């Protein structure tokens, strides 16, 4: 790391002085404030909505129910990114506690909320189901009725959905390779275990916020969304507009971690703005955040076949994902979690069935680590269970089975640039694994170490477009629809544009996403932006550099190869007095700005029947290791050391890459030890930051460290999420080893640890 230039964030001063303007800070003269009326039952048929009480609150301008939506011409009030199953306002029935049934717009936020509280809703309760396995039983109440003859797919679908019609399964992903029954027949040992991961909340610092207004028949939405073009398309479909008639503007965001992928409140503010004829803004409170989107609660059963010398012969996975009342991107979560459940191992016979299942709980969608955290918990815990059963060291067992360059993954694709072994060995070195993985402290506490490795795919196929321009003053601007959500994207894109143009990155301006001004990007997800958008920006900047040299060659009457690019000017090599400024070249073209446009895309996809194909154009690779101390009297877990190793290919910005990895590790620690959304018959019991615990500085490990592994000449690998998924599994493996018990459920609360300890003691006696 020594000798490298450190690039600070270009908006650091704005951030530390609170001058950066987020979506919740946006205001427009004359705007109204909105509030949502939500229901408090998990499943019921709407009988009557009484709004008269809301109108008695001074300042109320509109109270809108589902019946009022008929006043909007061409409105088709149902949407969804992958399955169109969500209504702008609940239609006929509510499907979870928190479902939206009415909207209020008022002159101020307090009046809107007070009026919303006065809306009375009557309903007839219906049977509800909350567990994904129970929801697949033949007698389970149907939350949606998907039929093959009805169109139901949302525009963001790019893979073949396989609903099981007549059930609550909205997508069944299959991955079959080899003959799994033959693989188990060849095994000397067959193990099976079921693992659970609870729903979790993103807890982004900035809540959901959106503002909408109509201007000359066009809809304008200012929103904190990771998906400006997806949001534009969905809103256009809702209102029967051409996509160009909808404009989505995205200011920098105060965090997301996946909760702001796809529309959340944008349809609702757009409807209110249309009906009132005024701009309308909605900002959710913290409770509403908890009932807007969660991580999927997941149940994963793994059956593993093994030879006595530590070779894996077969793996069968059955995964059930509770997607809540609406599918959102759950079908894709089940797909990515499905192939992610195989892990980075050489397994000749694989059978994966991954089910995305409706339940009467808040919708679940994208969450940092996208489906992989849940299946890595199951897969990597199973690897430790298998190592123990075979009497092998967990590190050695993994190393025997890891995939290498040129080998085939279960999907049939050939892997390249593979570094799982290096990541795992880097973690083992940091933990001093060779010194032993289990001991007792002088105070009687139980100490042990644990490992986990992760293989995470990147959105494939996808496309990013960028423009880089220089104006008459010689200023360079990047036009990109990558969203800045705190990860430092603007800084990295400025660096990648500055390199070919040989200018300081701090002089580059990066325009925030605006579907009227910035070109298309799939979305800011999947740790893809530095690789996908970064390549598009770099190519556009290279094209701009060549264009400037071509224009200067004509002006200076020399060959382009005789010129050199300098900051703000093009000069004849060796004759510095023969120069022409960039501004002069732009002015000579008669335009205000000289722009170059570039497209970068990757190709692939999986067969919906077999799961074979190209799941990821390249894989995000990492490992984590933990050393823990467990108090056998209280069950309390203390993390002594947490280390992660992430393969980055080539690091663009050392500072932001390090911060991303550290943030991922801390989020993983929260999932391991604290974070759990608890429900009682669909009623959320932990929907606040007193009962739902996230890590504080006091919870951090004694030592928190990481490695960013690079390879000369390698392409950039995204790393915004890679260090998160292996952390809960590494901690879980360490705790299980320390107490000598089998742990299968997150989080590892003191109560769960004590129960496991007591069960082990009872078995021993």
Image (cartoon, grey):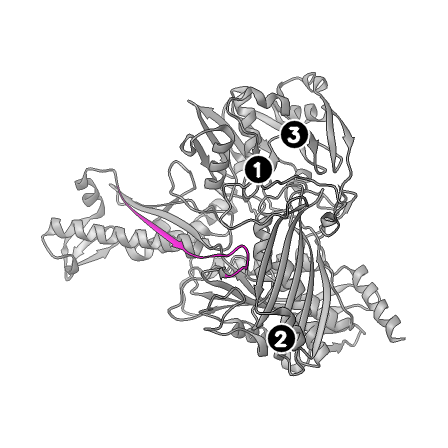
Categorize mark 1 by other alpha carbons within 10 Å: few (<14), some (14-19), many (20+): few
Categorize mark 2 by other alpha carbons within 10 Å: few (<14), some (14-19), many (20+): many
C-alpha separation, residue under disc 3 versus residue under disc 1 = 18 Å
Give x and y (percent) for residue 79.
56, 36
Residue ID for mark 1: 150
Q: Is residue 603 magenta?
A: yes
Front residue of 402 and 276? 402
Give x and y (percent) for residue 648.
47, 65
Observer-side mark, 2 or 1, equals 1
| Region of the chain picked out in magenta, as a range | 594-612
Q: Which mark sits nearer the N-terminus, 3 or 1?
A: 3
Give x and y (percent) for residue 475.
29, 45
Q: Is residue 256 magenta?
A: no
Residue ID for mark 3: 91
Front residue of 476 and 352? 352
User: Is 450 placed above or below 469 here?
Assistant: below
Categorize mark 3 by other alpha carbons within 10 Å: few (<14), some (14-19), many (20+): some
Please indicate whether residue 576 sits to the left or right of residue 76 in the image.
left
Please indicate whether residue 21 sits to the left or right of residue 495 in the image.
right
Please indicate whether residue 194 sits to the left or right of residue 591 in the image.
right
C-alpha separation, residue under disc 2 versus residue under disc 1 = 43 Å
Quarter of the image where the N terminus is located: bottom left
Q: Secondary structure at mark 1?
A: loop
User: Is 111 placed above or below 2 here?
Assistant: above
Residue ID for mark 2: 312
Front residue of 256 and 264? 264
Q: Secondary structure at mark 2?
A: strand
């Amino acid at each position: 790391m020594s000798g490298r230039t450190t690039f600070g964030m270009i908006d650091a001063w704005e951030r530390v002085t609170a001058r950066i303007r987020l979506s919740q800070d946006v205001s427009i003269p004359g705007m109204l404030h909105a509030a949502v009326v939500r229901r408090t039952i998990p499943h019921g048929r709407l009988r009557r909505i009484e709004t008269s009480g809301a109108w008695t609150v001074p300042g109320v301008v509109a109270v809108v129910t589902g019946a009022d939506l008929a006043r909007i011409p061409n409105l088709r009030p149902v949407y969804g990114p992958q399955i169109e199953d969500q209504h702008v306002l609940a239609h006929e029935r509510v499907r979870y506690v928190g479902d939206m049934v009415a909207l209020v717009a008022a002159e101020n936020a307090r009046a809107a909320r007070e009026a919303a509280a006065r809306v009375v809703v009557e309903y007839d309760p219906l049977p509800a189901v909350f567990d994904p396995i129970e929801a697949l039983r033949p007698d389970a109440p149907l939350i949606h009725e998907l039929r093959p003859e009805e169109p139901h797919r949302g525009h963001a679908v790019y893979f073949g959905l396989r609903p099981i019609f007549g059930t609550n399964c909205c997508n069944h992903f299959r991955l079959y390779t080899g003959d799994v029954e033959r693989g188990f027949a060849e095994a000397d040992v067959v193990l099976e275990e079921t693992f659970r991961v609870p729903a979790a909340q993103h807890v982004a610092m900035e809540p959901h916020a959106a503002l909408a207004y109509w201007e000359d028949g066009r809809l304008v939405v200012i929103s904190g969304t990771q998906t400006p073009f997806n949001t534009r398309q969905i809103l256009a479909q809702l209102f029967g507009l051409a996509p160009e008639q909808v404009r989505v503007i995205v200011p920098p965001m105060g965090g997301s971690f996946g909760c702001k992928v796809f529309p959340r409140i944008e349809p609702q503010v757009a409807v209110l703005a249309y009906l009132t004829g005024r701009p309308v803004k909605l900002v959710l409170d913290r409770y509403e955040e908890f009932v807007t989107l969660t991580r999927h609660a997941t149940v994963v059963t793994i059956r593993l076949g093994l030879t006595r010398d530590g070779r894996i012969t077969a793996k069968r996975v059955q995964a059930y994902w509770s997607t809540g009342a609406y599918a959102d991107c759950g079908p894709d979560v089940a797909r990515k979690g499905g192939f992610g459940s195989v892990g980075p191992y050489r397994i000749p016979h694989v059978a994966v069935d991954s089910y995305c299942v409706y339940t009467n709980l808040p919708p679940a969608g994208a969450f940092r680590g996208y489906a992989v955290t849940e299946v890595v918990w199951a897969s990597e815990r199973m690897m430790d269970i298998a190592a123990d059963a075979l009497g092998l060291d967990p590190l050695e067992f993994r190393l025997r089975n890891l995939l290498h360059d040129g080998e085939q993954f279960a999907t049939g694709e050939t892997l390249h640039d593979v570094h799982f072994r290096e990541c795992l060995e880097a973690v083992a070195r940091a933990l001093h694994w060779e010194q032993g993985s289990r001991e007792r402290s002088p105070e009687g506490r139980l100490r042990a170490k644990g490992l986990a490795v992760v293989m995470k795919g990147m959105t494939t196929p996808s496309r990013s477009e960028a423009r880089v321009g220089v104006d008459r003053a010689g200023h360079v601007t990047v036009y990109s629809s990558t969203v800045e959500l705190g990860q430092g994207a603007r800084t990295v894109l400025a660096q990648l544009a500055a390199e070919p143009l040989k200018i300081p990155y701090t002089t580059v301006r990066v325009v925030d996403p605006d579907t009227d001004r910035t070109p298309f990007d799939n979305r800011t997800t999947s740790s893809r932006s530095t690789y996908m958008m970064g390549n598009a920006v770099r190519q556009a900047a290279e094209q701009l550099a060549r264009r400037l040299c071509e224009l200067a060659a004509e002006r200076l009457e020399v060959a382009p190869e005789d010129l050199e690019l300098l900051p703000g000017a093009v000069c004849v090599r060796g004759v510095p007095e023969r120069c022409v400024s960039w501004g002069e070249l732009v002015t000579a073209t008669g335009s205000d700005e000289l722009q170059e446009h570039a497209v970068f895309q990757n190709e692939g996809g999986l067969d919906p029947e077999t799961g074979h194909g190209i799941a990821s154009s390249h894989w995000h690779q990492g490992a984590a290791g933990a050393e823990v101390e467990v108090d056998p009297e209280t069950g309390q877990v203390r993390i002594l050391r947490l280390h992660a190793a992430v393969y980055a290919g080539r690091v663009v910005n050392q500072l932001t890459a390090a911060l991303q990895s550290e943030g991922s590790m801390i989020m993983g620690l929260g999932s391991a030890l604290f974070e759990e959304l608890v429900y009682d018959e669909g009623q959320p019991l932990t929907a606040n930051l007193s009962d739902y615990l996230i890590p504080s500085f006091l919870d951090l490990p004694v030592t928190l460290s990481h490695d960013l592994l690079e390879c000369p000449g390698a392409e950039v690998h995204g790393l915004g999420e890679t260090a998160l998924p292996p952390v809960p599994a590494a901690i879980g493996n360490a705790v299980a080893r320390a107490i000598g018990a089998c742990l299968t459920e997150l989080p590892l609360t003191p109560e769960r640890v004590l129960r496991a300890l007591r069960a082990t003691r009872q078995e021993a006696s």
